[in-house]
Image (cartoon, rainbow, N blue to C red):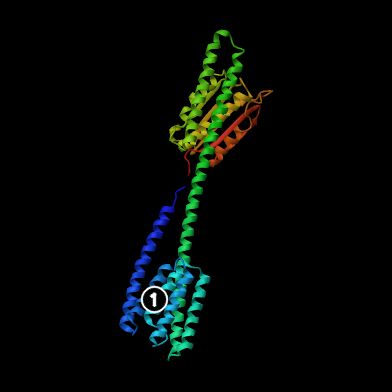
Amino acid sequence: MVDLTPIHSRWEQAATAALMAFAVAVFAIVLHTLQSDTGLSERQAIGLALVQALALVVAPRLPAPAWACSAAAVVAASLWVGAGLWVDAMVNSYLIVLGVLALTGRARTAVLYWVGTLTVGVFLVLARRPPDWLWDLLEVAVLAALVLVAGTALRGLAAARRGLRDQQAAADRQRQRNTLLEERTRIARELHDVVAHHMSVIAIQAEAARYRELDTAPETFAAIHDSARTALGEMRRILDVLRSGDTGSAPQPTLNDLPGLVDSVRATGTRVDLATSGDLATVSASIGLSAYRIVQEALSNAVRHAPGAPVEVRIRLADRHIRIEVDNPLRAHPSAGIGAGHGLIGMRERTTAFGGTLTAAPVDGHFRVRAVLPIQDAS
């Protein structure tokens, strides 16, 4: 997961620097306006301008003291100047402080700031009773409400955007985790198919070795050795992919590798007839891998449950579909086999993943596996 703390820290530093620069500008403008438009002394003007600038700087971290200082400066200026209800430079800078408070505070506190503004205005009305006080009070009350509403709305919009970004980031992370889990599930299924097939072949070869002549033993053990080496090679490749998190750079078997698969089963003494029709090169890689694994699992089941029985494998491409059929005679007392029960589930998962169909059931004294898959992966 990416650590966003340095990025957030840089944004905070940039915002603080911008606020400081803005406060300096407010100080200069308020000071110049007070000196040119009022009869305040230089010390009074500097003090009032400095209070407003400092209130602006500390508003994000100390909102209540910032508001209190700014409002007090407005009251002091109005009492010192004595012309009208408000001093324009002070009330304008006060509205700026209110805007910063609304951007950094909560909506509930914004209401309190508006009530406080109205209270300050009423206090000045009672203290000075200037002419047109009602209009001046309503004007500032409306302006303060607009500033606070706008600031609160902008803060809510920014928070909503941050929440949306966080949700999108969380969704992306979850999508990546789901993709990784799906890939690991696929690899685990590949591992099961490889182990189940090769271990079944090795078991049959070892069983058949007991009944063969001594002079054929070297050939039998050589076949067992080849099957074991092939199984270990495939397992090592799949485990390397699993450890590295690679999502498909390693080569995968295709329909063109079926003859080698059939030869490995024939080495057990099982007669396997393979018949294909159509251009197997037109089948997509993902469909070809699933078709290969379906045939592999069907052959494993055949040699495990009906050792010695002949097996027919037919692959036919027609009507934009690939049709797979694996057929072997049933034995009167089928062998239970090792790992029975998961192969059919894996074959069904492979077919349904691409919108295909699978049937695997006894038919007229034979066990028949039929699968129909699209030639091209629709995804």
**Camera-side residue: 158 or 259?**
158
Q: For the view shown, which residue lies furthest in the front direction?
A: 43
**What amino acid type is highlighted by mark number 1?**
Ser
For residue 282, above or below residue 175: above
**Residue topped by disc 1:** 93
For residue 8, above or below residue 229: below
Which residue is at 40% across, 68% downward? 57
For residue 211, above or below residue 59: above
Q: Position of residue 280 (x, y in %)?
A: 45, 32
**Camera-side residue: 286 or 20?**
20
Q: Quadrant of residue 135?
A: bottom left
Q: Quadrant of residue 206?
A: top right
In the picture, measured across the screen, residue 280 lies left or right of residue 310, that is left
In the picture, measured across the screen, residue 340 lies left or right of residue 374, that is right
Q: Is residue 279 visible to us here?
A: no
Q: Position of residue 108 (x, y in %)?
A: 53, 71
Q: Quadrant of residue 140?
A: bottom left
**Camera-side residue: 303 or 325?**
303
Q: Is residue 75 visible to us here?
A: yes
**Camera-side residue: 154 or 286?**
154
